[in-house]
Amino acid sequence: MPCSRHLLLFIARNQLGVIMEFDVASLAVLAVDYGMQLVLASATLVIGLYVVKIIVGVLGRVFEKSNVDLSLRGFLRSMASMLLKVMVYITALGVLGVEMTSFIAILAAAGLAVGMALSGTLQNFAGGVMILLFRPYKVGDVIEAQGYTGSVKDIQIFVTILNTPDNKTVLIPNGGLANGSMTNYSTQTTRRVDWTFSIAYGDDIDRAYAVLNRLLVADERILKVPEHFIALSELAASSVNIVVRAWVNTADYWAVYYKMNEEVYRAFADEGLSIPFPQMGVHVQKVDS
């Protein structure tokens, strides 16, 4: 019996040793295999992203040499960069050993769920496509939309980037720009400038007309055709309002607008014309008790 017990212990120890040696060897083989796959996948990812960066840069130079419209350059570069990066990530996962058929099916299902969650983002993408197709504005145009006014710096896949006159950068979603109201100040070469100037009741209106006409004629930036327009527009509660309209080149709009305000203020004072302002009279009456 003791001999049998020793024999069984000896056999068990030998079998355990064999199993342990087998497990260590298997783990070593698996570590080498997966380690190589991980290294290859990492290399694929790093090299792929670097190549994508080079390709996008080359595309930018090709677009520039081919005189591709500025509005299209940013959009196409962003689109190419996104698609190429997705391909690199899928390739890296394939090298890592992920079954791509199942992965693509899972990706499609996840894409559907994400698409429903990001419906606003997809709307912005569709808006960007519509903007590039119908071209309501282009890079360099001055537009007013969504409560902002500025020069279009870039049109990207999801947003349009504006530079405001006070040098702020504003990102406006393309969906709102494609579906909402928008004013483009750069499509026409000329613009009409409108003013409303006021004089006091009792002032000589003909003298006011003469002063305004003289100032308009003296400014060379104001176009002769169409001819400027001056008329009495309103008999207000405390003033006589005169409307003035003149045409200028689009680039001169604000300079002419502000300069004319300054000139009228000085000229009216020199000519004895009053610019009224709202006043309130208070009468105190003593009541005998």
Image: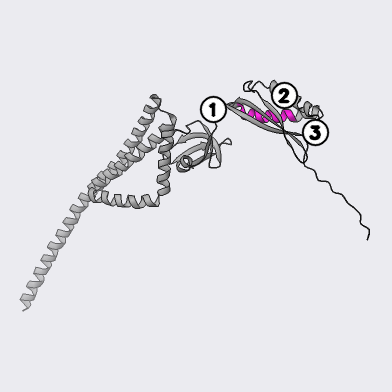
Q: Nearer the viewer, residue 241 or 26?
A: 241
For badge 2, the amino acid type reads Asn
Secondary structure at numbered mark 1: loop
Mark 3 or 2: in front is: 2
Q: Main secondary structure of the magenta part?
A: helix
Residue furthest bottom in the image: 1
Measured as percent of width and height from the top left, residue 236 is found at 75, 39
Query: Marks 1 and 3, how far apart in space?
Result: 37 Å
Res 148 quadrant in image: top right
**Disc nearer the start of the sequence (1/2):** 1
Please give the name of the residue rendered at 67% of the width and 31% of the height, measured from the top-left corner.
Answer: 258
Query: Marks 3 and 2, how far apart in space?
Result: 17 Å
Relative side of 243 to 109, left or right: right
Where is 190 relative to 289, above or below?
Answer: above
Magenta stretch encompasses residue 256: yes
Measured as percent of width and height from the top left, residue 59 is found at 36, 31
Measured as percent of width and height from the top left, residue 127 is found at 43, 40
Relative side of 204 to 180, left or right: right
Query: Marks 1 and 2, how far apart in space?
Result: 26 Å
- Which residue was labeled with disc 2? 213
- Which residue was labeled with disc 3? 274
**Disc nearer the start of the sequence (1/3):** 1
User: Magenta segment range?
Assistant: 252-264
Secondary structure at numbered mark 3: loop
Res 266 quadrant in image: top right
- Which residue was labeled with disc 1? 188
Measured as percent of width and height from the top left, residue 197 is found at 72, 33
Q: Quadrant of the C terminus?
A: bottom right
For badge 1, the amino acid type reads Gln
Q: Nearer the viewer, residue 43 or 71?
A: 71
